[in-house]
Image (cartoon, helix red, strand yellow):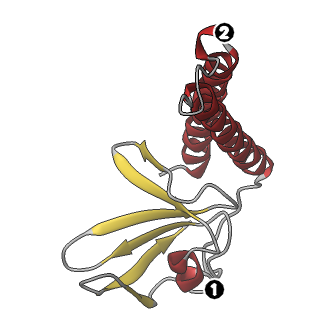
Amino acid sequence: MEKQKLLDKLIEHFEAEWRHFLKSAQVHHEMATHEENVAENEYDTRGLEASYLAEGHVKQAKEAQLTLSALKRLELESFEDEPIAVGALVELANKAERRFYFLGPRGGGAKVEVDGVSVTLITPNAPLGRALSGKTVGEEIILGGHAPATYEIINVT
């Protein structure tokens, strides 16, 4: 998989997320300030609730924008024979499955599909990001949860 193509998909994902939260913040702001949502009594909180939603969506839009900026500044490097660090695309495998992760600067948890392969964005601060950082091809990690599983790092680009 070409990493530039992956990075382009991640940028596209966060641009769409940014637009979505910005639009949603605008809609909720308009609702909060609309004359129909003026409180009729002390229990009428429609306008207040809409303002809280607007504020939350503004924060999410800002987070998406920060992630976008970080991804656009990211210089892609080859990690062949190098320890895993930010910018690495990592392929993990065990007997049952293969998983692909991109170690990025921000935006952990986002998933994109590139060439029919699902890739999850993780950050160095996430438990998996910490487990992978500094490792190389051939090493193993244990992914926790209710049924821990051992995965081998089979490719890093």
Closer to viewer: mark 2 or mark 1: 2
**Residue at horizontal 66 percent and vertical 16 percent from the top:** 30
Q: Amino acid at mark 2?
A: Glu
Furthest-front residue in this view: 41
**Residue at horizontal 62 percent and vertical 54 percent from the top:** 107
Furthest-top residue in this view: 35
Of residues 26 and 113, which is closer to you in this image? 26
Q: Is residue 92 left or right of residue 135?
A: left
**71 relative to 57, above or below:** below
Residue labelled with disc 2: 35
**Residue at horizontal 70 percent and vertical 36 percent from the top:** 58
For residue 134, the mark is: 1
Res. 24 visible in picture: yes
Q: Quadrant of the C terminus?
A: bottom right
**Residue at horizontal 44 percent and vertical 87 percent from the top:** 138
Give the quarter of the image for residue 64: top right
Residue 53 x, y percent position in the rendering: 60, 35
Give the quarter of the image for residue 13: top right
Q: Determine whether the residue tagged by mark 2 lies in a helix, strand or loop.
A: helix
Res. 136 visible in picture: no
Label 2 neighbourhood size at 10 Å, few (<14), some (14-19), many (20+)? few
Q: Determine whether the residue tagged by mark 1 lies in a helix, strand or loop.
A: loop
Residue 2 x, y percent position in the rendering: 53, 49
Of residues 13 and 94, which is closer to you in this image? 13
